[in-house]
Image (cartoon, rainbow, N blue to C red):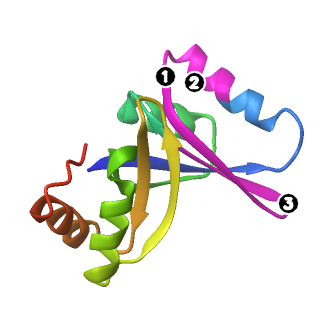
Amino acid sequence: MVKQFSIFLENKPGRLSNLIDLFERNQIRVLAMGIAEAGNYGIVRCILDAPEKAAEALRNANTAMNLVEVLIIDMEDLHNAVKVLGEKGINVDYAYTMDLGRIVIKVDDESKAKNALSEAGIKTY
């Protein structure tokens, strides 16, 4: 499974630019990103190529964040994957796309989901 950052930013112009600048200054590549608005704050969910380095940079910048485990599958497996997860009683909390025709999926039971997908022949990254 992959670590995903949930970064909490004030919902104002320039805040996202400051975050991306922080990544650039620290030579951290964004591999996937989704943004959700939540009133005065936004949640930037992202997969980064250097999670340890990113966590340190975010802590040094006093940026509120959380790390969670997510699954990544090929987009072409989406139909079968959500069917398998539903049949096994595993809830998909949210999902967003990334490059290379892949999709990031946050579920309520990562271990059970990974096993169910593996048993169904669906590759996870």
Q: Earlier in the sequence, mark 1 or mark 2?
A: 2
Percent position (x, y) of residue 69? 35, 56
Occupied quadrant, residue 83: bottom left
| Residue that carries the numbered disc 3 in the rendered image | 40
- Closer to the eye: label 3 or 1: 1
Q: Are marks 1 and 2 in contact (CB under 8 Å)?
A: yes
Q: Is residue 119 left or right of residue 30?
A: left
Occupied quadrant, residue 92: bottom left
Specify the segment rendered in magenta. Answer: 20-46
| Residue that carries the numbered disc 1 in the rendered image | 29
* Numbered badge on residue 23: 2
| Magenta run includes residue 30 | yes
Percent position (x, y) of residue 67? 43, 53
Please name whichever residue, 31 or 6, is drawn nearer the observer in this view of the structure. Answer: 31
Q: Is residue 51 left or right of residue 45?
A: left
Q: Are marks 2 and 3 in contact (CB under 8 Å)?
A: no
Percent position (x, y) of residue 91? 40, 77
Q: Is residue 98 left or right of residue 64?
A: left
Instruction: Give me the C-alpha separation between circle 3 and circle 1.
Output: 27 Å
Percent position (x, y) of residue 84? 27, 71
Q: Earlier in the sequence, mark 3 or mark 1?
A: 1
Q: Secondary structure at mark 3?
A: loop
